[in-house]
Image: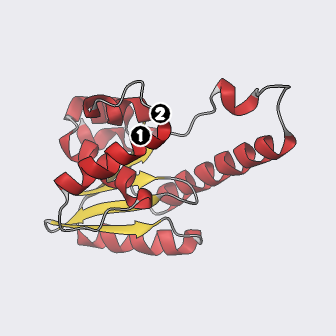
Amino acid sequence: MITIGIDPGAAGGIAYNLNGKTKCLKMPKDLGDLAQLLNYLKEQGQTLAFIERLTIRPDDVFMAGGATMGKLYQIQKMMQNFEQLKAVFDVCDVPYCLVSPMKWQSGLRVKGEEKADRKRRFKTIAAQRHPEIPITLWNADALLIMDFGIQADNKWIRDHICERKKDIFS
C-alpha cells in the first residue's frame, strides 16, 4: 500500500511512502503536476491518500471589528483550492480519506499550544520519525499525516474514505 499524506494549501506539502522510502514534495502550484504524481503512484500499486480536512473556524471570519474582505477572500480561495484538490483525486481515481487536524494530531500531545510552538513540535516529531529527510515547515505536517494514515485502522478508514471507494476496505 502506498500511503500519501497531504497538507493542503500553498505552503503545504505531500509525503508518500513508496517501496519503504519516504519522499516529500511541496504542494504543486499546477494541478496537472499533482495528477501526474498520482497517476505515477497508482501505477506502482494500491494507493490511499490522507488529506487534512480544511475547515473555517469562527475566528477566521469574525475578528475584532468584524470580518475583513481580504481575510474572507483568502478563505474563499483556500476552500476553492481544497475542492479542486479533491477533484484531482477523483479524476485520477485515487481513494482518499479526509482527516481533521484534531484527529491526526491527537497522539502528538500538542493540545493548548500556540501555533508556533505546535509547528516546532511537529518538526521535531517528524525529524525523529524520519531522520533521513530534511524537515521543514512545509513537509512536517504532510509527513505526520502520512504517518497517521499508515497507522490508521481499517475501521477508521472505512468510516472516512471518500464515498465512491467504500468497497476497498469492506
Callout 1 touching callout 2 (CB < 8 Å): yes
Percent of width and height locating residue 156: 28, 30
Is 5 above or below relative to 14?
A: above
**Residue 109 position (above or below residue 24):** above
**Residue 117 bears which disc, if any?**
1
In x, y percent, where is residue 50? 37, 47
The mark found on residue 153 in the picture is none
Could one spot residue 98 in this view of the protein? no
For residue 114, the mark is: 2
At 31% from the left and 69% from the top, the residue drawn is: 41
Q: Amino acid at mark 2?
A: Glu
Q: Residue at x 67, y 24 (%)?
A: 58
Q: Is residue 81 left or right of residue 139?
A: right
**Number of marks in picture:** 2
Q: Quadrant location of residue 133?
A: bottom left
Residue at 42% in and 30% down: 113
